[in-house]
Amino acid sequence: MKTAVMTDSNSGITKEEADRLGIFLLPMPVIIDEQTYYEGINLEQRFFYESLIEGHDVSTSQPSPGDVMDMWKQILSKGYDEIIHIPMSSGLSSSCATAIGLAEDFQGKVQVADNHRISVTMRIAVMEALHMANEGRSAREIREDLEKRAYDSSIFLAVDDLKYLKKGGRITPAAAALGTVFHIKPVLTIQGEKLDAFAKTRGMKKAKAIMLKALKEDLEKRFPGIDPKYVRIGAAGSGLSLEESREWQAMLQEMFPEVQVYYDHLSFSVGSHTGPGVYGMGFSIVQDPSIVYKV
């Protein structure tokens, strides 16, 4: 049984990584001033965030059904018996539900995992799927395993500029105006489903401290006494400089010295709603600590 692993660019996995690892990567469409770009293909971090900052009309979209099915057909034509497809959480996009519907025409050869994850926690699920596929597990077995453990993770985000949340209708214009005046930084969380408010504070330094405390408490409460070797923590950011991203990763590593910590850029699907300057973090519980989750 030869099983292919497919995901989308919301996983934080780059095209270069995917090609090297043998993962099939579907780039997410981004529309800027009515022109469609594809994440990591003809749209990079700098241009995307410059477009947001300059006030261009920026939005994200789910992949077209035709693009999804064409990729499945191409994969199967390469000698794979089946596909495990891991899209972003169904709670954040309709792309998962669409894929599940499309897979019905493939007679069980395509299994779509509703893993309820995005970004740094989604990466972990994809890498675990790749490991299981290489061990000879079927697509159905991999899907069932990923869905069973989907909620063994958490994500926290601190937003720098409220205007992007206002644009997306997540806060009112009045709240955005007051928040800007008083330097309010909202902390958001994703635990399986939608992006929800968690806390708010003044200044990014305090917001980072809140996130660190929240992640530590969530980990200790839900997985008491867990061996650190079964925990992976992802630092993330949107439009951060190399120095800022390294400092953020180092801060998390200092807080969790026995845990492997890695860094990924936030996907454009998240960044379009939160804007640049966002700091994020997430943990995942893994089954096999020997797997290399970030090359």
Image: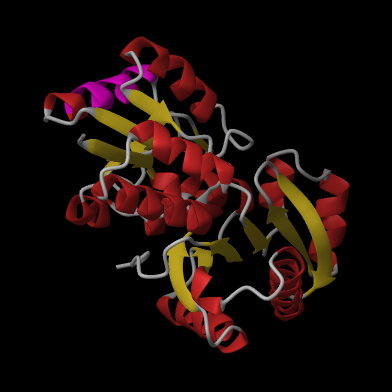
Indicate the position of residue 81 as horizontal and vertical percent values: 21, 28
Q: Is residue 57 magenta?
A: no
The structure residue drawn at horizontal position 86% and vertical position 52%, both measured from the top left corner, is: 175
Q: Which residues are magenta?
A: 65-74
Q: How many marks?
A: 0
The structure residue drawn at horizontal position 33% and vertical position 49%, both measured from the top left corner, is: 132
| Front one among 71 and 206 | 71
Q: Is residue 74 left or right of residue 146?
A: left
**Does residue 266 appear anywhere in the picture?**
no
Q: Is residue 72 magenta?
A: yes
The structure residue drawn at horizontal position 48% and vertical position 64%, both measured from the top left corner, is: 239
| Front one among 155 and 287 | 287
Quarter of the N terminus within the rendering: top left
Is 62 situated above or below 252? above
Q: Is residue 288 left or right of residue 156?
A: left
Q: Is residue 125 left or right of residue 177?
A: left
Magenta-highlighted stretch: main secondary structure?
helix
